[in-house]
Image (cartoon, helix red, strand yellow):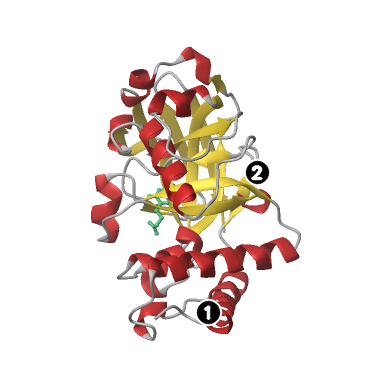
Amino acid sequence: MPLKVQEIQKLARVVDDALVQAYEIERLTATFADLSLSDAYLIQDEGIRFRRIRGEREVGYKMGLTSEAKRKQMNLDAPIYGILTDKMQLSERQNFSLTGSIHPKIEPEIAFIIEKELSGKVTPEQALAACAWVCPALEILDSRFLNFKYFSLPDVVADNCSSSKFVLGQRKFSAREFQVDDLARLELTMQVNGKVVESAVSSAVSGNPVYSLVELCSLLDSRGLSLKAGSIVLTGAATAAIALEPGSQIDLEVEKLGNTWLKTIP
Ligand code: OOG
Ligand code: MG
């Protein structure tokens, strides 16, 4: 049974309060065992509406669970998407304070910036041709659920796919410089305080980060939406996420795409 509008609004409020006040809540499916994925996206939409009311602006999307490493870490099995807002974007020069986070983690990604709207079913070549730029990205996750655990996709979708912050590499590379296949062969290396903690090849992301874009278009299309020009897209982490500690420097190097970094403070 689909939830009533009032129930969607109520659950979105529960998740949003936890986000704003940085406390943990029980997963929604503990109470609503048969919460559907489509209702979960409606809860996500409603949460974004609350953010808009607070003055945030949508700037793109993040794909989640596009790599086997992530699906294994979270014990979930299908790609999902969340929405990015301007408030989530950090600059490389900005120290990230962990105050206000619940249990933040960080993960290495590849991002695209879209220059031509994409809608419906698209081929990888069409998807890449619609991109202006490609660059490395670090995503900070922060689930609102107890101990960063949830046991179903609807929980994490309702929580906007655990999104918290992201940083894009300052230097952007023209997507025109790459063929689709080139983007499956890039080595990603994430270091914390100068020590390599995670590494992978970009094919870990959906076989190719471009396929993650294709998948996003198809997920959006199934909800009657399209990927607008100007959108930032995080294609999903290539490795498992790692817990963030204060006083760390996290560096991500992506072969042929340069690097990005972030420093954490208490
Ligand atoms: C869900 C979000 C997954 C990714 O890149 O796979 C994600 C989570 O891990 O809590 O952002
Ligand atoms: Mg991610």
**Residue 11 numbered mark, or none:** 1
Residue 153 in sight:
yes
Q: Which circle, 1 or 2, is nearer the viewer? A: 1
Check the picture and name the quadrant holding the C terminus: bottom right
Q: Is residue 261 left or right of residue 150?
A: right
Q: Quadrant of residue 203?
A: top left
The total of numbered circles placed on residues is 2
Residue found 54% across the figure and 77% down from its top: 8
Mark sitting earlier along the chain (1/2): 1
Q: Quadrant of residue 150?
A: bottom left
Labelled pair 1, 2 in contact (Cβ < 8 Å): no
User: Residue 58 appears at what percent x and percent y?
Assistant: 65, 50
Q: Is residue 214 left or right of residue 98?
A: left
In the displayed structure, 55 sits above or below 210; it is: below
Q: Amino acid at mark 2?
A: Gln
Q: Nearer the viewer, residue 80 or 4?
A: 4
Cα distance between the residues tagged 1 and 2: 33 Å
User: Residue 158 appears at what percent x and percent y?
Assistant: 47, 68
Residue found 53% across the figure and 74% down from its top: 15
